Image (cartoon, grey):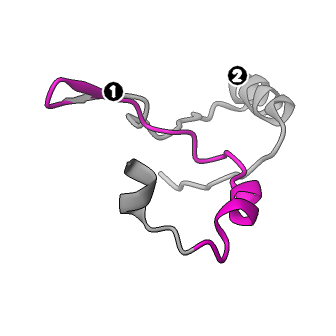
């Protein structure tokens, strides 16, 4: 069976594609993402962060401050 990938920005597009699938007899599938699972490591629960967060404001704080990760942890 031939496959295509459709990239869209609006959730309305997905809704329209699902409605069309009912009439045109095609299947819409999406990949399974397990990124939201939390992990326990040495008794500490680690929850994955959101990759869409804008961290550009942090560059202003840490640029040319000579701060290494060791200093941030202390």
Q: Position of residue 9 (x, y in %)?
A: 81, 45
SS class of the residue under badge 1? loop
Which residue has dot 1 on it? 38
Q: Which residue is mark 2?
A: 22
What residue range appears in magenta? Answer: 41-65
Circle 1 packing at 10 Å, graded few (<14), some (14-19), many (20+), is: few
Q: Is residue 34 magenta?
A: no
Residue 12 pos. (x, y %): 85, 29
Image position of 59 (left or right of 12): left
Q: Residue at x 75, y 33 (%)?
A: 14
Vertical comparison of 8 with 68: above or below: above
Mark identifier at residue 66: none
Please count the marks in the image: 2
- 63 relative to 6, above or below: below
Question: On the picture, is 11 further left or further right than 66?
Answer: right
Task: Report the front residue among 50 and 19.
Answer: 50
**Quarter holding residue 65:** bottom right
Q: Residue at x 80, y 31 (%)?
A: 11
Quarter of the image holding residue 35?
A: top left
53 inside magenta stretch: yes
> Which residue is pictured at 66% across the width and 46% down the height?
52
Q: Nearer the viewer, residue 21 or 71?
A: 71
């Amino acid at each position: 069976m031939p496959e295509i990938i459709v990239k869209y920005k609006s959730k309305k597009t997905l809704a329209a594609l699902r409605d069309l699938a009912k009439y045109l007899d095609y299947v819409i599938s999406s990949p399974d993402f397990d990124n939201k699972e939390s992990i326990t490591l040495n008794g500490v629960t680690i929850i994955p962060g959101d990759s869409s967060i804008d961290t550009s404001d942090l560059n202003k704080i840490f640029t040319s401050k000579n701060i290494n990760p060791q200093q941030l942890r202390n």
